[in-house]
């Protein structure tokens, strides 16, 4: 018995050892992108086509929900662009469900694509694999072959800052929202029901006090729910600017700049401003002025209520577009409220660089220069137009007053599909921003007249500077993903508890102390270092 | 059974005779070993060969270097997990949630015994099919239904509560309610499905035993307690022990859907924590480390419970 | 001679009531799901619909069957389920039977080998690499072979064999000169209908609902099983923040989309579960009380 047992165990060990040895995947460690002489010679420095001899690239991309039925290997936009550039793409489209696994498998299984496109690449991965050379360093390539992107970066230095890692390198091309396309950067915005305003005998509130009065009046005089939204976090995000909180935008959780020292980062979640914000929201919630199930409501419920006009005020996207003409036209837009301490900011704004990992060139790529040129077009006006509007005459047309709109066949689908579904047959931008998205070359709910109007009202109150997501070293990241994540989680949980009343404000000092004990000082050192790097560039 | 040999000569003789006996057994029962072949070949290829992947829990995973090539970081992932502010809460919640579910273990057995007593006919067929159907409802829909019924304002349950003169209960955000709702809605969904295996076991009960008991004047309940249950007892024990083997591995999708910051005190479990860290930055090896931690606890519990089962009931897994 | 005592009758009545009550409680979500799949979504979401359909609409089902892909999905899933279940039984039954025999030596190790596979796993990447190196990617084998048998089914089936196959029977057959193979085929299998039926059912249901293997190992859409196709339909119709921010289209269409998304969610469940629910009663007769009467007597 013992002997067979031993033999058996040895057998298993041998098998495992063999397997382990045989699995040494070779990794190509590149120091600098090997700019192949031949490949370079094939590239046209400017103009189209991009390459003299046809080039084929294997591209790995995520497949968003809207694109589930479209085959990118045969679709108008890529067909058109392939003809222009002489670059053919072989798309491997992966459903979002398995995107992370498949991405890791692509890296591990020795089956590296030439490009990772819209693959939800984590920032840390960009850095990890960039340092190894698996993802190419793009600094020089951009200088030489990406004039459009370079121009954008020169005009808006925060773009370059947002994509440069602590080692000074750029490992991916960004997805950009044109800085002046505020409507997209604001995302959802506040709306007030005119009917409720009339019943309350008020104008659109401009201060937090007026808003409170409006909510009370709506509750008493109308049958509507004074405020309802898709989440409490969103409501707070709108109101935070009225208390001077998150004064540099929403991209970096829980930090903004110290109002008394521009060079210092502040952890606003322990500040008095933030406490005042929570106390205000708590007051609203405890008096029944906010929909009581806002902490657990799901989108279906919210939309069902909203499209029946149940809300006197809400924060959402364009009401006419989304709730229909009848209910939607009752809503009037608002902007930032003035808080009790005089702050009046609309800080619920995303930075212009919406994502930094959507275009990665790998060490397998046969012609990185051509690839960069390929993507660079989409940072130009014509490229943005191609990506978001399509081909003139086919998918879009120019109106008399110079606007670009989708053609009739898109808007009124022959098969009874929604505009989105019809669009997905020709274009690929749905569900993922790439290149640069500009107001003139876009048609979506953010472009609806009421939404644009609202954006104009809001823009004056948007902070001068909106921070992109800061980039950290590997060591800093280790701290951020452990203690940092725990602290952010604690802040989020306690925020909701303070607001709902589950936690009384007498516990505030305890709350602050707990965060400090968890490691706040260390955390702020890291954020400060990142901010210092950001400022230096 | 095997006495400990005292001298080396005796050991040698002993060892060689054991080998001989093993060979003899092999020859005698070679067919039985052939029966084992397909399953064990499968396990070797698809479970043991990939098993080297377990070491990823001790590494900083770089996909392009592969699991073997990635650098070792020892117990760093585990330290990070143990040092987390939330470690004890996660552990506590996971254990309590799992244990609570385990307490309901007898329910499918009772229901199976009841179904078994029904006379064959349409009522029996229908009740079985209907009770096992909820097993197919997706988690998303189940939670959607719960949210709809338990809504503090529009939910059916609160309508009843208010009509009876009470205050609406915040089922969905009250940490005290989370566990009850989670576990009982789970039972609601899985009771019928859980009876199937017991029904099959009951089909093997010797009817002669029932005849004899009936002649002796035993009532139905007595017969169930003294014949049915003992007959299926080995099955019950095996299923219970296997259940323990996945104690820490609670399916997380449902918890994730029901979780919010207000009930996090009780709804925050290990699996959802891992999932959420993975959303921030892909944390492949960290997730693997925690999975390993869960497995180790599972195995300890498994051995423990098996030992207890053997002592108490003479039935066990091995 | 059967005598029905009074207590027996009382028991029958109580038992029937008990089962009926439980069934009614459990059947409620089923009725809800069926009603919800054909009701107006606003009524469902606002809580107006709680039992019977309100404002009947078949848009959900239309959306599901709109795409021909769903029939391909059904076909593939049926094939995968049948092939996979047969393979499962082929691998499982002999193995469990052998493990149930006292004369098998080394049982403890063997059981531990199996248990360990239930407790520890190498993870996705190594398993994927094995599947890849065997050339099984994008074939039916990637669906039916990984997971073809598991510790749970082996151990439960082993227990069944230990309980229902009397030792004397096997001994007697051996004395008559039968080999293990013969005994298994001619004696054991006929006696094991309940366990075969149950294991077949569990595995078939598992395969029918399976989704992850297909997601990872298949890239050819013509091989997609039902669940994958249904999932595509589901997310295509889902409404989310990304969908809206990316441009939702005209007012009419968005509201419509939200409505059908809700219906689709329920329709998908029915479409996927119905075939199984229909098949179940046919399998059920194999593990009904009394199926073994007469077969044990030799």
Image: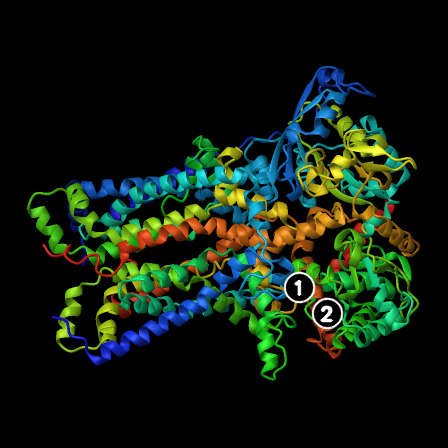
At numbered mark 1, what does the secondary structure look like: helix, strand or loop?
loop
Q: Foreground: C215 or A456? A: A456
Seen in the image, is C22 located left or right of residue A286? left
Residue C9 visible (yes or no): yes
x and y, in percent, of residue B126 in the image: 36, 61
Seen in the image, is B178 located left or right of residue C193? right
x and y, in percent, of residue C225 in the image: 48, 40
Q: Quadrant of residue C38?
A: bottom right
x and y, in percent, of residue A8 in the image: 30, 43
Residue lying at the far front in this picture: please name it: C55
Q: Dot 2: few (<14), some (14–19), or many (≥20) neighbours within 10 Å?
A: some
- On the rendered image, what quadrant is the C terminus of chain A found in? top right
Residue lying at the far bottom in this picture: please name it: B165
Q: Which mark is residue B88?
A: none
Query: Quick check: marks 2 and 1 in contact, CB under 8 Å?
Result: yes
The image's colouring method is rainbow
Q: Foreground: A391 or B238? A: A391
Q: Foreground: C22 or B76? A: C22
Q: Earlier in the sequence, mark 2 or mark 1?
A: 2
Residue matched to label 2? A291
Q: Which residue: 70% across, 66% down?
A: A294
Q: Dot 1: few (<14), some (14–19), or many (≥20) neighbours within 10 Å?
A: many
Q: Which residue: 46% across, 70% down?
A: B100
Residue matched to label 1? A297
* Residue at mark 2: chain: A
Q: Is residue B40 above or below residue A379?
A: below
Q: Quadrant of residue A73?
A: top right
* Residue at mark 1: chain: A
């Amino acid at each position: 018995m013992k002997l067979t047992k031993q033999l058996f165990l040895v057998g298993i060990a041998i098998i495992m050892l063999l397997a382990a040895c045989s699995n040494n995947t070779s990794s190509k460690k590149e120091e600098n992108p090997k700019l192949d002489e031949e490949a370079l010679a094939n590239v046209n420095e400017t103009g189209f086509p991009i390459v003299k001899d046809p080039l084929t690239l294997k591209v790995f991309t995520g497949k968003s929900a809207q694109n589930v039925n479209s085959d990118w290997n045969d679709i108008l936009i890529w067909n058109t662009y392939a003809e222009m550039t002489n670059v053919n793409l072989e798309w491997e489209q992966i459903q979002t469900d398995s995107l992370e696994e498949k991405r890791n498998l692509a890296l591990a299984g020795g089956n590296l694509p030439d490009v990772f496109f819209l693959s939800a690449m984590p920032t840390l991965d960009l850095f990890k694999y960039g340092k190894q050379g698996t993802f190419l360093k793009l600094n020089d390539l951009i200088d030489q072959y990406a004039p459009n992107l370079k121009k954008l970066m020169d005009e808006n230095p925060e773009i370059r800052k947002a994509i440069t890692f602590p080692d000074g390198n750029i490992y991916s091309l960004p997805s950009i929202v044109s800085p002046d396309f505020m409507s997209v950067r604001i995302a959802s915005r506040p709306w007030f029901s005119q009917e409720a305003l009339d019943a309350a005998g008020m104008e659109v509130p401009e201060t937090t006090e007026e808003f409170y009065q409006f909510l009370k009046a709506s509750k008493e005089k109308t049958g509507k729910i004074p405020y309802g939204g898709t989440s409490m976090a969103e409501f707070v995000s709108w109101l935070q600017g009225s208390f001077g909180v998150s004064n540099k935008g929403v991209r970096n959780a829980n930090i903004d700049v110290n109002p008394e020292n521009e060079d210092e980062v502040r952890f606003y979640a322990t500040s008095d401003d933030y406490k005042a914000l929570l106390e205000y929201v708590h007051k609203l919630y405890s008096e029944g002025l906010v929909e009581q199930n806002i902490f657990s409501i799901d989108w279906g419920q919210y939309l069902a209520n909203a499209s029946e006009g149940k809300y006197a005020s809400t924060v959402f996207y364009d009401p006419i577009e989304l709730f229909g003409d009848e209910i939607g036209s009752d809503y009037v837009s608002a902007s930032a409220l003035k808080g009790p301490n005089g702050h009046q900011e609309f800080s619920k704004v995303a930075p212009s660089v919406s994502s930094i990992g959507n275009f990665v060139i790998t060490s397998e790529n046969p012609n990185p220069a051509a690839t960069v040129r390929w993507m660079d077009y989409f940072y130009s006006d014509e490229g943005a137009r191609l990506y978001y509007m399509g081909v003139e005459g086919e998918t879009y047309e120019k109106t008399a007053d110079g606007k670009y709109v989708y053609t009739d066949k898109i808007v009124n689908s022959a098969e009874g599909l929604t505009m989105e579904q019809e669009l997905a047959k020709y274009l690929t931008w749905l569900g993922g921003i790439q290149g640069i998205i500009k107001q003139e070359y876009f048609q979506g709910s953010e472009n609806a007249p009421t939404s644009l109007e609202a954006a104009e009202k809001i823009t004056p109150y948007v902070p001068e500077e909106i921070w992109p997501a800061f980039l950290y070293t590997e060591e800093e990241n280790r701290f951020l993903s452990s203690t940092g994540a725990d602290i952010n989680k604690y802040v989020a949980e306690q925020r909701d508890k303070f607001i709902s009343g589950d936690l009384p404000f007498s516990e505030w000092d305890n709350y602050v102390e707990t965060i400090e004990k968890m490691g706040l000082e260390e955390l702020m050192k890291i954020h400060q270092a990142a901010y210092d790097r950001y400022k230096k560039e | 059974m095997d006495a400990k040999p005292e001298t080396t000569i005796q050991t040698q003789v002993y060892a060689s005779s054991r080998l001989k006996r093993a060979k003899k057994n092999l020859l005698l029962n070679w067919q039985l070993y052939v029966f084992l072949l397909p399953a064990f070949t499968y396990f070797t290829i698809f479970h043991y060969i990939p098993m080297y992947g377990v070491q990823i829990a001790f590494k900083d995973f770089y996909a392009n270097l592969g699991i073997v090539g990635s650098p070792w970081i020892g117990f760093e992932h585990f330290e990070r997990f143990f040092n987390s502010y939330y470690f004890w809460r996660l552990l506590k919640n996971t254990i309590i949630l799992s244990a609570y579910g385990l307490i309901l273990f007898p329910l499918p057995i009772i229901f199976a015994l009841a179904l078994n007593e029904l006379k064959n006919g349409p009522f029996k067929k229908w009740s079985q099919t209907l009770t096992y159907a909820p097993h197919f409802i997706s988690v998303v829909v189940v939670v959607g239904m719960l949210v709809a019924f338990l809504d503090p304002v529009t939910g059916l349950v609160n309508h009843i509560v208010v009509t009876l003169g009470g205050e609406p209960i915040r089922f969905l955000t009250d940490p005290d309610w989370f566990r009850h709702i989670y576990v009982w809605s789970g039972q609601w969904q899985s009771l019928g499905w859980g009876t199937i295996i017991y029904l099959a076991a009951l089909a093997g009960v010797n009817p002669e035993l029932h005849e004899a008991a009936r002649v002796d004047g035993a009532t139905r309940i007595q017969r169930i307690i003294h014949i049915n249950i003992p007959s299926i007892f080995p099955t019950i024990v095996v299923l219970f022990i296997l259940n323990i083997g996945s104690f820490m591995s609670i399916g997380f999708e449902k918890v994730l859907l029901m979780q919010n910051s207000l009930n996090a005190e009780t709804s925050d479990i290990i699996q959802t924590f891992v999932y959420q860290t993975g959303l921030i930055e892909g944390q492949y090896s960290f997730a693997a480390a925690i999975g390993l931690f869960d497995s180790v606890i599972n195995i300890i519990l498994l051995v423990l419970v098996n030992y207890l089962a053997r002592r108490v009931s003479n039935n066990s897994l091995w | 001679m059967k005598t029905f005592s009074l207590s027996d009758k009382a028991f029958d009545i109580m038992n029937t009531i008990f089962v009926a009550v439980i069934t009614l409680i459990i059947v409620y979500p089923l009725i809800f799901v069926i009603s919800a799949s054909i009701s107006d979504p606003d009524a469902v979401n606002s809580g107006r619909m709680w039992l019977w359909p309100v404002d009947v609409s078949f848009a959900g089902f239309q959306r599901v069957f709109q795409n021909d892909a769903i029939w391909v999905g059904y076909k593939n899933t049926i094939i995968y389920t049948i092939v996979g279940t047969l393979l499962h039984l082929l691998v499982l039954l002999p193995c469990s039977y052998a493990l149930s025999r006292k004369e098998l030596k080394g049982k403890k190790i063997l059981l531990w080998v199996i248990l360990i596979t239930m407790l520890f796993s190498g993870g996705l990447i190594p398993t994927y690499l094995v599947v890849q190196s065997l050339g099984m990617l994008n074939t039916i084998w990637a669906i039916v072979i990984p997971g073809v048998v598991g510790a749970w089914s082996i151990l439960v089936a082993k227990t069944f064999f230990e309980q229902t196959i009397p030792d004397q029977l096997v001994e007697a057959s051996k004395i008559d000169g039968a080999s293990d193979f013969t005994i298994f085929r001619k004696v054991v299998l006929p006696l094991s209908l309940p366990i075969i039926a149950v294991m077949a059912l569990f595995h078939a249901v598992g395969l029918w609902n399976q989704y992850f293997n297909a997601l990872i190992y298949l890239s050819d859409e013509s091989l997609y099983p039902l669940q994958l196709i249904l999932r595509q339909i589901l997310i295509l119709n889902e409404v989310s923040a990304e969908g809206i921010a990316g441009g939702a289209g005209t007012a009419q269409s968005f509201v419509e989309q939200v409505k059908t998304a809700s219906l689709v969610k329920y329709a998908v469940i029915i479409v996927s579960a119905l075939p199984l629910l229909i098949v179940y009663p046919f399998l059920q007769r194999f593990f009904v009380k009394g199926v073994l009467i007469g077969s044990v007597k030799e």
